[in-house]
Image (cartoon, grey):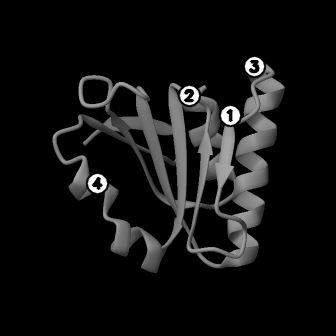
Amino acid sequence: MLEVAATAADDALAADIVALDVTALTPFSDTFLIATVDNPRHMRATMNAVSEAVKKDSGNLPNSVEGDGDAEWVILDYGDLVVHLFTEEGRSFYALEKLWGDAPRLRFGADQVTPV
């Protein structure tokens, strides 16, 4: 599901796509997928692209969705995977990569997954 969600975000032109493996750090999720979008329209398009791709691939729908397309952030909670979409300002403010700084990470984009 992580790869499908990351690919969908990348196809929707989200930027700085990073996955954090939080398995050892939190009991409520295994992975956070974080991506940056440009504006509310891009937020809605990326949110829809990820939701549709995951549903098509696995039949899974988010357990919950927080925020909306006009917010600085949206969370799609799939349980083991939590997708965080941010505007640049929102991503800087919430600083999840710093908050979960001990989590191993992968960077996505340009058809590749690489350890950071």
Amino acid at the residue labelled 4: Glu
Image height of 95 relative to 50, above or below: below
In the rendered structure, the answer to whether residue 97 lies left or right of residue 109 reads: left
Counting from the top left corner in percent of width and height, residue 21 is at 33, 31
Q: Which residue is denoted by mark 4 in the rendering?
A: 97
Q: CA distance from mark 2 to mark 4?
A: 19 Å
Q: Is there CB contact under 8 Å for labels 3 and 1? A: no
Q: Amino acid at mark 2?
A: Gly
- Give the residue pinned by disc 3: 58
How far across and down, in percent of the image, does residue 44 sit?
A: 75, 64
* Viewer-nearest of discs 3 and 1: 1
Task: Give the residue at x 44% y 80%.
Answer: 89
Q: Looking at the image, which residue sits at the far top? A: 58
Residue neighbourhood size for the residue with mark 3, other residues' Cα within 10 Å, grouped as few (<14), some (14–19), many (≥20):
few
State the residue at coordinates (23%, 37%).
Answer: 103
* 4 vs 1, front mark: 1
Disc 1 from disc 2: Cα separation:
7 Å
